[in-house]
Image: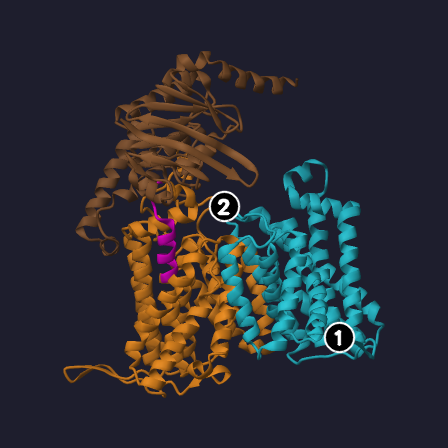
Amino acid sequence: MAILDIQGITKRFGGLTAVNNVSFSVEKGAILSVIGPNGAGKSTLFKLISSFLTPTSGRVNYNGHTITGLAPHEVARRGVVRTFQETTIFKEMTALQNVIVAHQLRCRATSLGIYFSSAAARADEERFHNSATEILDYLGLSTVKHMLARNLPHGHLRALGIAVAMAAEPKVLLLDEPFSGMNIEETDAAVKLVQGLRERGVTIVLVEHDMSAVMRISDKIVVLNFGTKIAEGTPTEVKCDEAVIGAYLGEADEEVGH
Amino acid sequence: MEQMLINGVVLAVNYALIALGITLIFSIMNILNFAHGQMFMIGGFVVYYLYGIFKVNYFVSLAAVVIVLGVIGWSFETFLFRRMRRMATREENSMLLAVGTALLLENLALSIFGEKQRGVPPVVTGVFRIGTAYLPAGRLLVMVLALALIVGLLLFVQYTKLGRAMRALAQDREVTHLMGVNVNRVAAYGFALGAALAGLAGGLLVTVFGVNSGVGNVYSIKAFIMIMIGGAGVVPGAILGAIALGFVEAIGYELLPGSITYLLIFTGLIIFLILRPQGLLGKPWG
Amino acid sequence: MGLEINQLTRHEGSGSSRIASENGRLSFRQKLRFAGFVLILFVAVPILLGRSPYYITVLTNAAILSFISLGVWITFSIGRMNLAQGAFALVGGYVVAILATRYGVSFWLCLPLSGLISAALGALIGWPVLRLKGVYFAMTTLSLTEAIRLLALNGGDVTKGATGIVNIPRPGAIGLFGLTIVPEFNGADPLPFYFLACALLVLGLVAVWRLSTSRLGWVFRSLRQNEDLATSIGINVAKYRVIAFGACCFMGGIGGAFFAAFHQNIYPATYTISDSVNFMLYCFLGGLSYIFGPVVGAFLLVIAFELLNAVQDYQALIYGILMIVCMLWLPNGILSLGTRHDGKQKYGGR
């Protein structure tokens, strides 16, 4: 059953078409990667799916319901949570506080109850604290949970970004370049992490440049070039796809200066 | 009808000086010069004292305005804002400092100049008739001078080494620094220039409206309105904003009673900003 | 290693964490300090200065100005520089003025009404305007202060334009079952107004502290630090911004209502741009990371201004110089003296 269905998504900025009539679907519990040369429109696609941008045309369906046109925080509430390319985190909070704040969606107490510290509010706080600690442990951040986020080393920041997203109890997690800037060991650990997330029942869509990681981890791959989908399939299929090879070779050509 | 247009043009051209000054400072240093109105006011007072009281030649007085305000602007950047940039932990601090400089100049002016409204004798006498409208020679002079200054500024920014350095700085501080430009020096000159422009506008308009030490905030607000309309940090935006404000004021004061004009301006502005926050030509803010 | 960890980690509720804005629990020292503050306000000052109306009036002003600035502090906590508080103080003042003089409504009813009306107006205007950030928000709110002043000036019969509304009656007595709980405020004695001001201040401090330490406070913090991230985890950013702004305007309205009854008049010029700027300055001077910041800032500046009365002519000038000096040498505010000087905060979060 497709949990996420992208139907003909197009985004135009003035004269520039960033995403052109892209369609694909994501099976529940799958890991799908979106790849493509630089400027292919991958990040824009993510913003469109999570409603941070409104598409010029097309729809995104989640669990059979259209989420296009909903406010971005609404989409997150429904269960589609995105992470950010840069290490986006609440810098002035500790790691633990970051993850606790992210539990906002799971608040059972009312605003008034929160203010006056009702029993429900206090129960919430307890739950959040425990849940946050568990998430941090799972991601290997328990040693730094009282450290200010802006003092965390780069690798931990990545994990914290995922921890924050996890706290929002996503059904679909959109990971924006989760492996960028990582060396081989770090990437290995991150790959295992992402697979572990899938085991926890989260469907994962990721945008990535790191080919080997993508090949290892994905059930399905979608390839974009200049905003258009040029290939879709399993890693094996995509690896041999001529259009894909052309697109990447074309990019390599540019780099070499032909 | 023609009177409104004539008034609009005179206002627009002078307001453009003000708008360009604050835009310059904002684009180079990312600081909103809250003291811009106070600098305008000080320019007016310099002309009042030199030209009005001591009977110094008007143009020499204007030159003095440039020097006085140039020094003030240069000092603000060198001694205050540069220091703040080094130690600021929040970006609000620079804005706060700008507010502080406005307070400082305002209170300084109050102490030195007193509260009274001051005027100066007209530089040239006579009135021109254009259609059904009257254009006093004094206002025409002021308009021509403002126009000349604007053209001069645009040429300066476009063709001189310092001007180009300022434009580069406005685009990208890091890169400009890496190209070997003394960023601090250029910034200081930029502030001096922006301040001088405000002062010159004051020195010109004092011959039309007079000056008192309380007009600072009024003109700061005018400056803000103009860059909000046109877009902060862009020269064409400043000019557009000045034209818009100049004409709206002229038309408003002609057709509407008293302070309703500005009430409408503000209401319209707030609505406009809700729809287009970056102004007409501004870059989308982040 | 121990020292490094101190630099990097956060100690929960240890030592003199004046940033009470984070911990849900106050340390014993903090509670002691607050109790001391309340005691000074309600006991020491009346005893020591009760005979001199001048000082009592100065402190009354300081107390309510702190209260109003506390509202501005709330908008700072969501990452906006709010220069519109003067407008909402004006609205609050006019609500009292109009209702009390024209319809004989009791001050005690007008007071919360002022707050609510200001809050409602703030929510209405804030909903679209809060999308702006940084200098754009500052300029727009500054324009708002002017706009409301002009509205009052051109309010025809409702606001009586430039003549304003005068002879606003002082608060009457509150009685219950024939017993007088609050005596009528008469003109000769400034103490009732002083006590009311202090009561409002203390209530305000407790309310804002509670706001800041609750989940809401953390939501506000997330808004200030990264609105996009907050959105991505499902926080309705627009809604919470409006809540914060509404709370700010509520306090502005109540402060304005107080002053209207205190001075017994209100004019369009009662709150100008300078006032909006001052409220912001009080927050900055005290320290934006501290709930007590606006209180410290307001009290210090108000008292300093009065002390400078001796140098009448240069009062404003010295005041201006003092401001600049404070900004340059204490960029994090007065209450930050005692934390690390390297710019890094010892304790996390603002």
In magenta stretch: residue A109: no
Q: Is residue A184 left or right of residue A252?
A: left
Tell me the colour chain C is drawn in. Answer: orange
Residue C182 visible, this angle: yes
Residue positioned 53% across, 34% down in the render: A17
Give left or right: position of B23 versus B51.
left
Which numbered disc covers residue C343?
2
Question: Can you give x and y, in whole percent of width and height, for residue A55 in the image?
Answer: 44, 39
Q: Residues within 10 Å of mark 1 (few under 14, many from 20)?
A: many
Give the CA separation, mark 1 to mark 2.
Answer: 49 Å
- Which hue is chain B drawn in? cyan
- Residue range highlighted in magenta: C233-246
Q: Is residue C60 visible?
A: no
Q: Disc 2 is attached to a residue of which chain?
A: C
Could you say which quadrant of the image residue A33 lies in?
top left
Position in image of residue A1 (x %, y %): 26, 26
Q: Quadrant of the N terminus of chain B?
A: bottom right
Task: Decide whether the magenta segment is chiefly helix, strand or loop.
Answer: helix
